[in-house]
Image: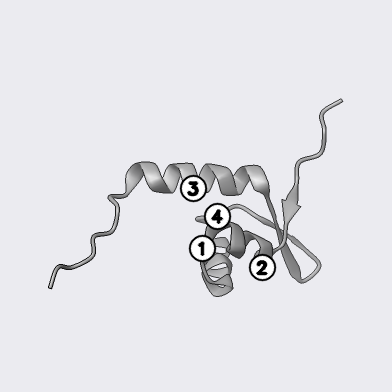
């Protein structure tokens, strides 16, 4: 039998990704982050967040700080 995966709330996912909660909601609404609504609340699998981080960091250049 396969063990259950950890499921996170939006505030927990925001802390994990180190982004604002509203950004997580936006990612969920646009389909860029997979999640499931349970009643009125979103739930996101930890595996989904890990895959999102891996995909995001692989395809985008790191941000540069402008020099003065």
Q: Earlier in the sequence, mark 3 or mark 2?
A: 2
Q: Quadrant where the C terminus lies?
A: bottom left
Marks 1/3: CA–CA distance: 17 Å
| Classed neighbour count for the residue bearing mark 3: other residues with Cα under 10 Å, few (<14), some (14–19), many (≥20) | few
Callout 3 secondary element: helix
| Classed neighbour count for the residue bearing mark 4: other residues with Cα under 10 Å, few (<14), some (14–19), many (≥20) | some
Marks 1/2: CA–CA distance: 18 Å
Closest to the camera, between mark 4 and mark 3, is: 3
Q: Which mark is residue 67?
A: none
Closest to the camera, between mark 1 and mark 2, is: 2
Q: Earlier in the sequence, mark 1 or mark 2?
A: 2
Q: Position of residue 36 (x, y in %)?
A: 70, 56
Q: Earlier in the sequence, mark 4 or mark 2?
A: 2
Q: Quadrant where the N terminus lies?
A: top right
Report the residue marked by disc 2.
Answer: 11
Instruction: Residue at the far front: name it.
Output: 68
Left or right: where 65 falls relative to 58: left
Q: Nearer the viewer, residue 21 or 15?
A: 15
Q: Which mark is residue 33?
A: 4
Closest to the camera, between mark 1 and mark 4, is: 4
Report the residue marked by disc 3.
Answer: 53
Instruction: Residue at the far left: name it.
Output: 68
Marks 3/2: CA–CA distance: 16 Å
Asked whether disc 1 touches disc 4, contact meaning CB atoms under 8 Å apart, the reply is no
Marks 4/3: CA–CA distance: 10 Å
Q: Which mark is residue 30?
A: 1
Quarter of image, res 50? top right
Callout 4 secondary element: loop
């Amino acid at each position: 039998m396969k063990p259950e995966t950890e499921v996170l709330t939006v505030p927990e996912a925001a802390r994990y990704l180190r982004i604002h909660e509203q950004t997580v909601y936006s990612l969920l609404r646009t389909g860029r982050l997979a999640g499931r609504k349970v009643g009125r609340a979103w739930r996101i699998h930890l595996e989904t967040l890990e895959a999102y981080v891996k995909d995001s960091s692989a395809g985008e250049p790191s941000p540069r700080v402008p020099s003065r």
